[in-house]
Amino acid sequence: MNSFTSSSSTTDKPSTAALASKAADPAGVGRYLLVMGLVLAIGLGFSWLWSATMKLAFLDPEYAAWSAKQDLVARCDLGDLLVLGDSRAGAGMMPTRLPGNGINISVGGAKPVEMYFFLRRAMACPNMPHHVLLSIDAGHFHSTDTFWERSARFGTFSVADLHEIEAVARKTGDESLFDQPRADGLPNLVRDVLYATSFPTLNFASMVRGGLFLRYAHNVEERSKTLRARGHHLFGDADGDSAEADDASLDSFQVLPLEGWYFERMLQEMQARGIRVDFVTVPVNEATARHITPQLRKGFTEYLAAAASKYPNFHVLVAPIPSMPDRYFGDVFAHLNQGGAERFSASLAAALRREHP
């Protein structure tokens, strides 16, 4: 028994010593760290590449529609009429039902800041339409929500674009947009680069929810459908909705300095190019319209009237804030459903033919 114990103990000693020797070997540790570093770098590189180039595989269907609209602009497939606005305009205006076979590049959550950069890309085309339908909800003049979570994350802005917006924010004294995400503790320059290049952590939650690639087939179909519809995209498809949208909670009309600056910049640049701009407010449901305050309606009307008096190319085609029966709305955000979009687009087409025979 003693002999066995002694032999076993003697056998273990060289093994322990060898391990200790390897642990103390700087070259061995260095190789180990190098291999681990390469593995991590390759993993980060792959995930970054996936995050930046395969968004159709994991983001929600709204990105698929956004991608289709950007593709129409990139191809300069604009037609004779450009619809530029937020999600209500994206759901409510059907280019195939409007004169000119134009396109609708309205996207969810878009405000004057985002719209300006969409417009600037369209104006770089040699065949930019000479007629724009501009549509912005009253609440989108006084909000910065969804800018980082949706617009920047979807790839709307380059690093240079974000630097430009930041400079305008400083110029106008309105840094609400850049105060919003500072909980991450990152300097503006670093954050801008991460968003513009789709750093993987920004899309991690979407990758998990989307099963990394499980949304690809559905999103490709959604993108194709949006292309066929010339940019029209529904957000809700219910057979009616009587919920009060956010507009009902607005006491008055207000404009953030940054949003106001980009709204005017859009009008200035379209004025310089001889582009006619018709402002259209897409209807809300009756449930919301009943709670629209006189102050909100009056403030919005006066703001648009002031713009019309300053820019001869700018006209208010549909007075704020119209309404339609609840049955024409597809969700709680007052997005028109298919029937509502068809009805509104038909009335809008008639108004355009009267104004531009």
Image: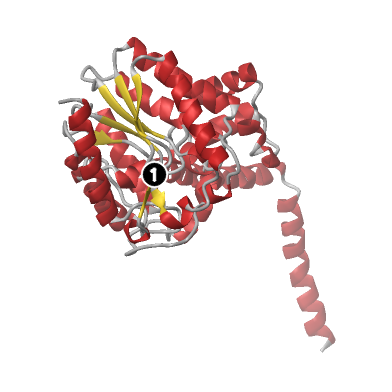
Image-quadrant location for residue 144: top right
Image-quadrant location for residue 26: top right
Q: Secondary structure at mark 1?
A: loop
The answer to which of 224 and 42 lies nearer the viewer is 224
Dot 1: within a 10 Å radius of its alpha carbon, few (fewer than 14), some, or many (20 or more) residues? some
262 relative position to 311: left or right: right
**Residue type at numbered disc 1:** Pro
Q: Position of residue 71 (x, y in %)?
A: 27, 35
Image point (53%, 52%), residue name: 291
The answer to which of 28 and 127 lies nearer the viewer is 127
Q: Which residue is mark 1?
A: 322
In this rendering, the count of numbered labels is 1
Q: Position of residue 49 (x, y in %)?
A: 43, 41
* Figure check: 313 above or below 258: above
* Figure check: 275 above or below 30: above
Image point (78%, 84%), residue name: 4
The answer to which of 334 and 295 lies nearer the viewer is 295
Extreme-bottom residue of the structure? 1
Query: Does residue 147 appear in this view?
Result: no
Extreme-top residue of the structure? 272
What coloring was used for the rendering? Answer: secondary structure
Q: Quadrant of the N terminus?
A: bottom right
Image point (45%, 20%), residue name: 307
Query: Does residue 260 appear in this view?
Result: yes
Q: Position of residue 319 (x, y in %)?
A: 38, 35
Q: Quadrant of the C terminus?
A: top left
160 relative position to 316: left or right: right
Q: Position of residue 36 (x, y in %)?
A: 59, 47
* Figure check: 90 above or below 254: below
The answer to which of 214 and 152 lies nearer the viewer is 152
* Figure check: 17 above or below 343: below
